């Protein structure tokens, strides 16, 4: 069992401290766990909404509207499921000592990028290259 890392309430990772030190890792671990809790709470209300929505509606326009709403809820639910998987993957990378490093180049990912997108696996430069390649292949 690891020793508890003290983290002041107002702590923010800074560029002038060692990259992915214990405090930074604990900061991102807490941030990811809070995000996971938030997503799971949202998904519970989505599931409850879907269960409540399973009723017989005689008006065809109302039924179509209800089905559109259900389809949207299901897409949101799928997006939430994928985000939880990304969060779990990021938490695993923290435990394995790989968090914060670009999976393509091995270079550190900027702290600002990690703070904005804690599940990211690519540096900004690698992400831009990836998106350019996708655009080129999509246009074919």
Image (cartoon, rainbow, N blue to C red):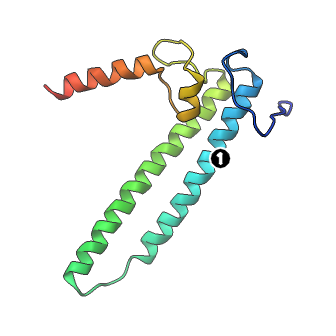
Q: In which quarter of the image is the C terminus?
A: top left
Left/right placement of residue 116 relative to residue 129 reads right
Residue 52 lies in quadrant: bottom left
Does residue 7 appear left or right of residue 116 in this picture?
right
Quarter of the image that includes the N terminus = top right
Query: Which residue is drawn at the image coordinates 25% and 87% (left, top)?
Result: 58
Tell me what residue is drawn at x 66 percent, y 33 percent. 28
The residue at 39%/62% (across/down) is 73
Q: To which residue does mark 1 refer?
A: 34
The answer to which quarter of the image holds residue 12 is top right
**Residue 118 seen in render:** no
Q: Is residue 105 left or right of residue 16?
A: left
Height in image: 66 above or below 125?
A: below
Q: Which residue lies furthest to the left in this view?
A: 140
Residue 87 position in % (x across, y down): 56, 39
Please say if 53 is above or below 77: below
Is 32 placed left or right of 78 in the picture?
right
- Tag 1's secondary structure? helix
Residue 86 vertical position relative to residue 123 in the rendered view, above or below: below
**Residue 119 image position (x, y, % from top left):** 53, 34
């Amino acid at each position: 069992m690891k020793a508890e890392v003290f983290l002041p309430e107002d702590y923010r990772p800074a560029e002038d401290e060692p990259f992915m030190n214990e405090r930074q890792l604990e900061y991102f671990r807490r941030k990811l766990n809070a995000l996971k809790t938030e997503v799971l709470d949202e998904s519970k209300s989505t599931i409850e909404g879907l269960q409540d929505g399973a009723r017989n509606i005689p008006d065809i326009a109302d039924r179509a509207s209800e089905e559109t709403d259900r389809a949207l809820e299901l897409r949101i639910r799928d997006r939430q499921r994928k985000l939880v998987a990304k969060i779990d993957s990021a938490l695993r990378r923290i435990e394995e000592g790989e968090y914060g490093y670009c999976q393509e180049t091995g270079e550190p990912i900027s702290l600002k990028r990690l703070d904005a997108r804690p599940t990211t696996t690519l540096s900004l430069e690698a992400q831009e290259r990836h998106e350019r390649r996708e655009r080129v292949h999509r246009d074919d």
